[in-house]
Image (cartoon, rainbow, N blue to C red):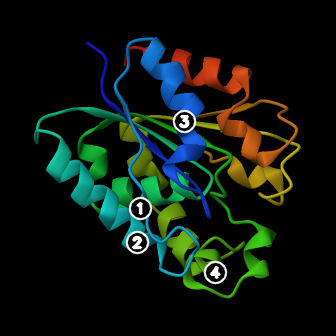
Amino acid sequence: MKNPVILLHGLDDTPQVLAKLARYLGDRGWSAHAPALVPSNGSVGLEVLAQQVADWVHSTFAPDQVLDLVGFSMGGIVGRYYGQRLGGLQRIQRFITLASPHNGTWMGYGRLNPGATQMRVNSPFLADLNGDLASLGQVQFTSLWTPLDLMIVPAQSSVLPVGRSRSIPVALHPWMVTDDRVLSQVAQLLEEES
């Protein structure tokens, strides 16, 4: 039996950006869900969006339902906060991030709002999460990233020293949720037994 998969979108996105990935997984037998993170423009802290995820999971699934989580860009960081700070790791089996700024991005300096500030290089928010990487070891964690990323700068910021990371040379950041190589890799990772 396949776990339900929660898909978390990125900054300035809606769940629609994940439609191709959701269809791809649905065609292969997964139940994929993409809750809206509102507002997605960075005007609230990522912990607020993570609480939305926690509340949505609580109201959508039975307490004993094991879940898989896929987060794109900001969604990967929101997913980490949900997992590492709001108890989500207790029910997540597989956690995949797609081009997420785990170590920050210099592009975060392009905005002054709370969410963007939290995704800056050396931000206290990320330092807090990264000070607790061992907790991610209790799930099957994988970071998929592209060395060609112009939104996650430096692109290597998407790599964490926990779990696995795989580089896929996708030309543009937004294509990480539509590129066939990424979709195939996500499905393979979700198939893996623990």
**Of callouts 3 and 1, which one flags the residue occurring earlier in the amino acid sequence?**
3
User: Which amino acid does the dot numbered 1 rest on?
Assistant: Tyr
| Placement of the N terminus among the 4 image quadrants | top left
Pinpoint residue 111: horizontal percent, then vertical percent. 72, 82
Asked if disc 1 and disc 2 are in contact, CB closer than 8 Å, the reply is: yes
Can I make out residue 161 in this image? Answer: yes
**Of callouts 3 and 4, which one flags the residue occurring earlier in the amino acid sequence?**
3
- Residue in the picture at 34% in, 25% down: 31
Give the CA distance from mark 2 to mark 3.
Answer: 24 Å
Mark number displayed over residue 81 = 1
User: Which amino acid does the dot numbered 4 rest on?
Assistant: Thr
Identify which residue, 41 or 186, lies in the foreground.
Answer: 41
Question: Which residue position holds label 3?
Answer: 19
Pinpoint residue 94: horizontal percent, then vertical percent. 41, 31
Give the CA distance from mark 1 to mark 2.
Answer: 6 Å
Mark number displayed over residue 47 = 2
The kind of secondary structure element at disc 3 is helix
